[in-house]
Image: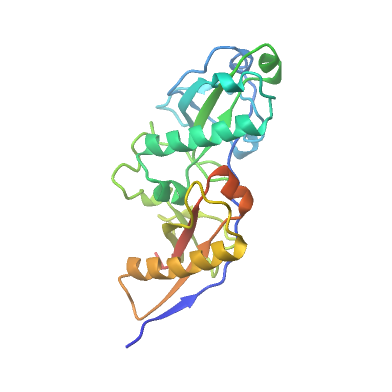
Amino acid sequence: MARRALFVPTVALTAVVTLLSACSGPGAAEEDSPEVPELGVCRVLAPDDVSEPANSSEVVDCTEDHTAETYAVGPLPEELSEAAYDSKEVGAFAYKTCSKAFMKFLGADESLAMRTLLSWAWFRPSEEAWADGARWYRCDLVGGDEDATAYANLPETAKGLMATGIGPDEWMQCVNGDAVPGAPRIPCSQKHTWRAVSTIKVGREEDPYPGDKVVEVTSRDYCGDQVSAWLEYPLTYKFAYTWFHEAEWKTGNRRSICWAWTTG
């Protein structure tokens, strides 16, 4: 008997990279300092904070409630010493550096990292400190994705959280609704109807953008097969996918996310 897959149409989702954050407080000296920030410290950040290029939120003990953990810091490379404060070159460096460090810190491959509810933000010195020659970056892991209205508290450390190759349900993306587009991502530990089960790579790093149609069709075809395999080849099943446009391609994304209809 032939298997029948029911594709649930989706729209292309734009990947919004969580880049920035701000909140001044008792630790307000950090953003004005030429010194590289401290690694491994924790803070309480909210989505509203993730809108400014610099941040000096107060550090809290990681055994206390916190929503952000600093997992990578360092000086900017010499070739960016003359770059403008908001230059694309600085942003591209931060995206590549923080993305790779994010996966390494969690112990996640690219697929797991794209399907987790966790995300990252990066910070630089204040404009005044930049003008005075400060050149550093800070990458913070935060307890929610780019669409979160509030961040969840993190464990004492998120290091190695995905090292088993299977992310904890409380930190993996699911949706509770008839369709994936427009629905808020929720932890898979909650009642849900859709689960992000895999990703597919639609191009190599050096490839030019192939166009929206090619990316969408490739995503649809491969996700149909991926979801069928994940569900152990049922006779009928429903799947969806989220894919990305040229702007995200230029930042380095080459993957679409595959979703399976599965109640939990």
Q: Residue 41 at what x, y percent from top left?
A: 45, 23
Where residue 172 sits in the image (x, y, percent)? 42, 51
Q: Nearer the viewer, residue 259 or 100?
A: 100
Query: Residue shown at 44%/22% (left/top)?
Result: 61
Residue at 53% from the left image edge and 30% from the top image edge:
44
Q: Residue at x 43, y 57 (%)?
A: 199
Q: Nearer the viewer, residue 80 or 166?
A: 80
Image coordinates of residue 181 in percent, x first then y, are 59, 63
Q: Nearer the viewer, residue 177 or 105?
A: 105
| Image location of residue 136, percent across then percent down | 56, 20
Q: Is residue 167 visible?
A: yes
The N terminus - image quarter: bottom left
Q: Is there any visible trace of residue 192 in the rendered image?
A: no
Outermost residue, bottom side: 1
Where, by quadrant of the figure, is residue 263 drawn?
Answer: bottom left
Quadrant of the frame with the C terminus = bottom left
Give the residue at x 42% y 47%: 110
Residue 160 placement, left or right of 68: left
Whether 237 is drawn above or below 45: the answer is below
Applied colour scheme: rainbow
Label total for image: 0
Q: Is residue 204 left or right of residue 52?
A: left
Q: Quadrant of residue 178?
A: bottom right
Q: Where 187 falls versus 22 (above or below)?
A: below
